[in-house]
Every structure is written in C-alpha cells, then in structure tokens.
Image (cartoon, rainbow, N blue to C red):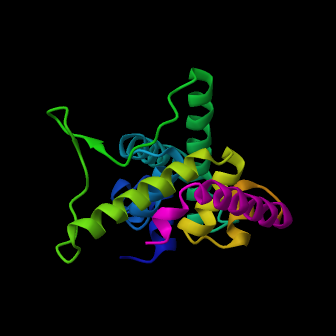
C-alpha cells in the first residue's frame, strides 16, 4: 500500500482509486466496529457503507489535526449512534442475532473451524451470542466506548478525540460500561465456567 498521507492527499483531489486503497486498510475494522455497535451483519455492512460514503464526501475537508483512523472512527461512531437513536424511536425489537439470513430465507451460522469439536464449536457460538447480546444491553454511551476500547483496541486518547469527550469521561464510561457488562454476563456465568 502506498503511504497513507499520499493516499489522503490524492483522495482530497478527487482520486477515487486512492480513496478506495485508503479505505481497504480500514474496511474490516469499521465493519467489525459497526457490527459490535449494531448487533447484526446487515446493519453493520449498511452502516459501514454509509461511513465510507460520508468519508468520501468529506475527505476534502480532512485537516489532519487528528489521524485519519480517528477521523474515520468519528464518522463511524456518529453513524452507529444515529442508527441506535433511530431504533429507539421506532421501538424496534431488541434481539440481537449472530445468524444471517440467506437468499432462501434460512438462517445460517458462520462456518466452523475444522479443528473444533462440534460441542466446543457450539459452546463458542453460544458464548459469542451471549457476549453480543450483553453488549447490546449496555447503554449507548457505554457501548460506544467499550466497543472502541475492548473490541477495537483503540487507545483512550483516540477514543477521547473521536467522541469529543474528555479523557477522564472516556475512562469513567469504560469503567462503568465494563462493570455493567460484567453484571449482565454474570447472569450467564455457567457458560463461562465450562
């Protein structure tokens, strides 16, 4: 990949190929982030697409005061939070599923590793489902920072820059979010003891 700064400069001048190369470096991370925030693959992919469209439209205004990664996560967090607010207004169903719908209307689990025994794979799938549901139960303000820190491994400082919150507020919300997540997960403690 070409130097990120060169790709940014080319993108600012309207070079769509340079922007595509730039986005390829972050595509999986942004989809993972939106998935953890929104809880299902389809919404995550739609949100990620919206993030990239917004980034493309706004790249000429990128001033470099923050890293490109921080700027992109700022857009992603805004898109995810907007979607969560829309869901609340629609009083949507709060169930979160790790299943995806196929073309024939059936639901499928992701393919398992050949190494894992069927029981172990089922247990891992159940743990993933419990964890995703627990993340989905967090207050939006906690979910955002916990996903950024503990799932995406973004530094406290970059989370503060991305969200516009003070470093102390970020640390406090992460701490409270982790505590809330722990309480939620304790309801399913038996799954984690096996």
Percent across and percent down for residue 9 are 51, 65
Residue 167 is left or right of residue 181, and the answer is: right
Give the residue drawn at x 26%, y 66%: 119
**Which secondary structure is most common in the magenta stretch?**
helix
Determine the residue located farthest toward the top in the rendered image: 90
Is residue 191 rendered to the left or right of residue 137?
left
Taking 93 as reference, is 160 above or below it? below
| Residue 128, image quadrant | bottom left
Q: Quadrant of residue 164?
A: bottom right
Q: Is residue 170 magenta?
A: yes
Identify which residue, 118 or 136, lies in the foreground.
118
Residue sitting at 56 percent across and 21 percent down? Answer: 90
In this rendering, would 11 be left or right of 149?
left
Is 97 magenta? The answer is no
Q: Nearer the viewer, residue 4 or 158?
A: 158
Q: Is residue 181 left or right of residue 96?
A: right
Magenta part of the protein: which range?
167-194
Residue 165, position in %: x, y? 80, 57
42 is higher (above) or lower (below) than 160: above
Residues 5 and 146: in front is 146
Query: From what the image shows, is residue 131 above or below residue 66?
Result: above
Q: Position of residue 102 (x, y in %)?
A: 20, 39
Classify the position of the C terminus by image quarter: bottom left
Q: Viewer-proximal residue, 17 or 78?
A: 78
Q: Residue furthest left?
A: 104
User: What residue do we see at 61% from left, 59% from top?
Assistant: 186
Q: Position of residue 52 (x, y in %)?
A: 45, 49
What residue is shown at x 44% (from left), y 48% (from top)? Answer: 48
């Amino acid at each position: 990949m070409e130097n990120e700064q060169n790709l940014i400069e080319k993108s600012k001048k309207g070079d769509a190929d340079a922007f595509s190369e730039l986005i390829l470096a972050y595509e999986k991370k942004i989809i993972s982030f939106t998935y953890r925030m929104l809880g299902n693959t389809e919404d995550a992919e739609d949100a990620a697409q919206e993030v990239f469209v917004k980034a493309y439209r706004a790249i000429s205004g990128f001033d470099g005061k923050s890293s490109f990664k921080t700027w992109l996560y700022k857009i992603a967090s805004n898109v995810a939070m907007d979607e969560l607010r829309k869901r609340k207004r629609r009083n949507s169903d709060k169930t979160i599923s790790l299943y995806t719908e196929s073309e024939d209307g059936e639901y499928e689990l992701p393919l398992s590793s050949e190494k894992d025994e069927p029981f172990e794979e089922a247990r891992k799938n159940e743990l993933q489902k419990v964890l995703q549901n627990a993340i989905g139960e967090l207050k939006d303000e906690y979910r955002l920072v916990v996903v950024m820190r503990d799932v995406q491994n973004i530094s406290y400082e970059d989370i503060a820059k991305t969200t516009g919150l003070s470093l102390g507020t970020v640390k406090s919300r992460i701490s409270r979010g982790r505590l809330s997540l722990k309480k939620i997960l304790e309801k399913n403690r038996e799954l984690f003891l096996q």
